[in-house]
Image (cartoon, rainbow, N blue to C red):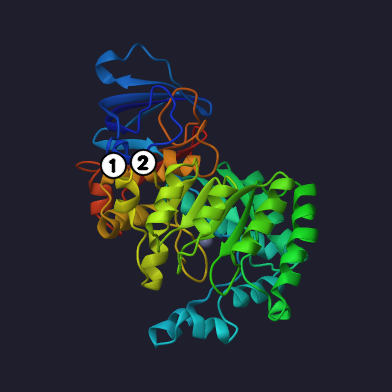
Amino acid sequence: MSILIKNIKELLQVRDTNISVVKGKDMKILPSIKNAYLLIDHDTIVDYGSMDTIQDLNAEKVIDATGKIVLPTWCDSHTHIVYAGNREQEFVDRINGLSYEDIANRGGGILNSAEKLQNTSEENLYLQSAERLKKVISLGTGAIEIKSGYGLTIDGELKMLRVIKRLKKEFPVKVRATLLAAHAIPKEFKDNKTAFVNLVIDKMIPEVAKEKLATYIDVFCEKGYFDLEDTERILKAGKEHGLIPKIHVNQFNAFGGVDVGVKHQALSVDHLEEMNQDDIDVLKNSDTMPVALPSCSYFLSIPYTPARQIIDAGLPLALATDYNPGSTPSGNMNFVISTACIKMKMTPEEAINAATINGAYAMGIENMYGSITKGKKANLIITKQIPSYGFLPYAFGDNNIDQVIINGQTI
Ligand SMILES: [Zn+2]
């Protein structure tokens, strides 16, 4: 099936030759074609250009995008959408004055999600997760990374990763799986964290690698969770089994985790709400993508990742949702982009670059996703009729998406 989209008010993120990442000052540049057309053949972008230059194109279906903007779908490189139940009671507890730590100490937080997950069948877990995935696709997400981490046992982690594998099979969007066994320390290991780290290294990583259930290895590197030594040991073990590091780091404390990530060639270091100059310097000499999760800062009322400091130092930045039941019960990339502009002082161009091509890099799929380039997958957002692309972050909380196309198919 071929589709011609014509009379596009503006076609965004047009890259004639593919680039893998946009950094520093270049993030302010978002190449586009006004009054454009785009041609899709099966699942691939095969041609585009100005309407003035359009040839006699034969297409089985024609979409008239008069007044509408077309851009690549969002690449959400950091989520935890496979989980059981919700935690709105903890949300209310926080409103009433309890801290994240208070809640964790009474068995809430990640351990609460882990208990719910234990008591949920794989089928039910799949159904709950599939609903979330459907919703984020309708909000323009065309590629998504999904982590384990609420299992905290071998069986629990395998259950989550099998659900991710099934989502990958059943849905047309690109899905990448990450083993985040070291997400929290289970109750049984409260006084013996090393034994749990050993379990992750000796049992979980080899089993997951053997079943080929994950591409990435992740660790929640934070005070009170997994320290630098634990993180190094787990990343090393993951790499020995062919898993690529991507880590949670600097959410509450900057204590050298970025350095550990870069040392182990992490594809991305995520969160970064707390950054010092050493972290910036270390990233400058690396291929590691910094990833900001502004919805998490919004929901927890913690500082935002210092995007200006990162970008003005010449670094790239990607944006993702962190969709999870505790700190970010939202997978809306449009909200992420608005919040990045409003709270992190990113320009709309920077935010869109961060949520498309840089997000694709942060999940290792920049060759096929993240820009309007011939040969790439036809994963596209067609907006409603809007005055300009700056209207997308400006009209925060609105849904200005008219249609989503995934692999050349209208969703
Ligand atoms: Zn996360």
Residue 411 visible in the picture: no
Total marks in image: 2
The reply to whether callout 1 and callout 2 are in contact (CB within 8 Å) is yes
Image side of residue 234 versus residue 256, left or right: right
Q: Nearer the viewer, residue 276 or 307?
A: 276
Q: What residue is shown at x 68% (from left), y 47% (from top)? A: 243
Image side of residue 101 versus residue 206, left or right: left
Locate residue 374, reporting x and y percent: 45, 22
Judge whether 327 appears above or below 177 on screen: below
Which mark is on residue 209?
A: none
User: How much space separates mark 1 and mark 2, taking CA atoms?
Assistant: 6 Å
Q: Give SS at disc 2.
A: helix
The amino acid pointed to by label 2 is Asn
Question: For the residue carrying disc 1, how many other residues have a C-alpha within 10 Å: few (<14), some (14-19), or many (20+)?
Answer: many
Whether disc 2's CB lies below 8 Å from ligand 1 is answered no
Image side of residue 179 versus residue 58, left or right: right
Locate residue 358, reporting x and y percent: 43, 41
Locate residue 196, reporting x and y percent: 73, 70
Residue 244 visible in the picture: yes
Judge whether 155 appears above or below 243 on screen: below
The residue furthest left is 387
Which mark is on residue 349?
A: 1
The amino acid pointed to by label 1 is Glu
Q: Give SS at disc 1.
A: helix
Q: Nearer the viewer, residue 188 or 335?
A: 188
Which mark is on residue 353?
A: 2
Q: Nearer the viewer, residue 30 or 167?
A: 30
Residue 188: quadrant of the picture: bottom right
Locate residue 215, reporting x and y percent: 65, 46
Judge whether 164 appears above or below 353 on screen: below
Whether disc 1's CB lies below 8 Å from ligand 1 is answered no
Judge whether 156 appears above or below 173 on screen: below
